[in-house]
């Protein structure tokens, strides 16, 4: 099997490096139009820092893991194509400051449609709004209507600083696809990739829309927990309670758990806000 990932960023690079490390029989290519970024991935100074990433990249690079700007070549060669490009908050038009800007996802879909000469399994790795796969399918059909591509949702659940442990031992891997016969086969192909190192009971398969929505819901729940403990912190200041003690007390409840109960400055970044 040959797979490629369009987008050599924080998600695409480490994810493909882990797949290459655990699946030596699979050729993995990470492609990007940014020459400087690709050069960095091919050097000893990787463009992002994650503990353990250097070792995993060096283990497989130029063996079955390749970083390249030859986007068209690897689109043609690959059976499975991951889309892992940025989906920033919109800076203009409808949804300004709130909605996700999908222009990079759209550009990837158009390029895949224009270049492909055989059926592809296109995997949404980027965090996208629900029903984005519908838009991707429409682009593929309009440009290459005779080629039966399949679109899969496989969202990432990585945290900065723990990306390698998160990939090596994930809580779950989520794969969503169409409920047609061809859709189920596409889901199974992606399932087979992850099952090389992830226990099968941790690989969850759903329909497309459930997978897309589950990612957004997970982010919303995490943001909600951070906001909730900060609200409790303000209450602690008024009552004389200690927020760390309250967080520890409620975190020992198995129904709640201890994670994301650290009172601080609140959630930030581009993802939680728009999700």
Image: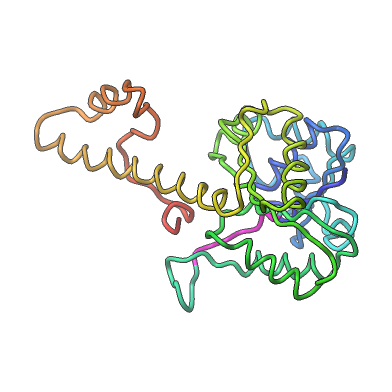
Give the percent coordinates (x, y) of residue 162. 56, 33
Give the percent coordinates (x, y) of residue 127. 57, 54
Drawn side of residue 144 relative to residue 271, left or right = right
**Residue at the outermost bottom position:** 93
Res 222 quadrant in image:
top left
**Residue at the outermost left position:** 239
Q: Is residue 73 above or below residue 189?
A: below
Q: Please name the residue shown 53% across and 59% down the image.
A: 130
> What secondary structure do most residues of the magenta stretch adopt?
loop
Near-viewer residue (221 or 29): 221
The quarter of the image holding the C terminus is bottom left
Indicate whether residue 13 is drawn in magenta: no
Give the percent coordinates (x, y) of residue 182. 77, 52
Res 74 quadrant in image:
bottom right
The quarter of the image holding the N terminus is top right
Indicate whether residue 85 is drawn in magenta: yes
The residue range painted magenta reads 83-89
Give the percent coordinates (x, y) of residue 190. 74, 42
Q: Is residue 62 above or below residue 82?
A: above
Drawn side of residue 253 relative to residue 201, left or right = left
Q: Please name the residue shown 40% across and 30% down the image.
A: 259
Drawn side of residue 127 relative to residue 72, left or right = left
Near-viewer residue (139 or 47): 139
């Amino acid at each position: 099997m040959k797979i490629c990932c369009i987008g050599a960023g924080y998600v695409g690079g480490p994810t493909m490096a882990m797949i290459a490390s655990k699946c030596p029989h699979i050729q993995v290519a990470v492609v990007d139009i940014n020459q400087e970024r690709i050069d960095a991935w091919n050097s000893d100074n990787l463009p992002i820092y994650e503990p353990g990433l250097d070792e995993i990249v060096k283990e497989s690079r130029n063996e079955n893991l390749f970083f390249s700007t030859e986007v068209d070549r690897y689109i043609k060669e690959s059976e499975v194509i991951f889309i892992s490009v940025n989906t920033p908050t919109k800076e203009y038009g409808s949804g300004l400051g709130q909605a996700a800007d999908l222009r990079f996802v759209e550009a990837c879909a158009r390029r895949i449609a224009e270049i492909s000469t055989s059926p592809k399994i296109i995997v949404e790795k980027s965090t996208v709004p629900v029903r984005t796969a519908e838009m991707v399918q429409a682009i593929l059909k309009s440009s290459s209507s005779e080629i039966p591509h399949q679109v899969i949702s496989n969202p990432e659940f990585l945290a900065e600083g723990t990306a390698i442990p998160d990939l090596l031992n994930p809580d779950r891997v989520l794969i969503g696809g169409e409920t047609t016969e061809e859709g189920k086969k596409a889901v199974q192909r992606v399932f087979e990739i992850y099952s090389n190192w992830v226990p099968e009971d941790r690989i969850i398969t759903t329909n497309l829309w459930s997978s897309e929505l589950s990612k957004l819901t997970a982010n919303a729940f995490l943001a909600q927990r951070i906001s909730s403990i900060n609200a409790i912190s303000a209450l602690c200041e008024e009552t004389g309670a200690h927020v760390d003690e309250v967080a520890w007390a409620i975190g020992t409840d198995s129904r709640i758990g201890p994670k994301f109960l650290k009172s601080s400055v609140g959630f930030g970044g581009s993802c939680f806000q728009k999700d």
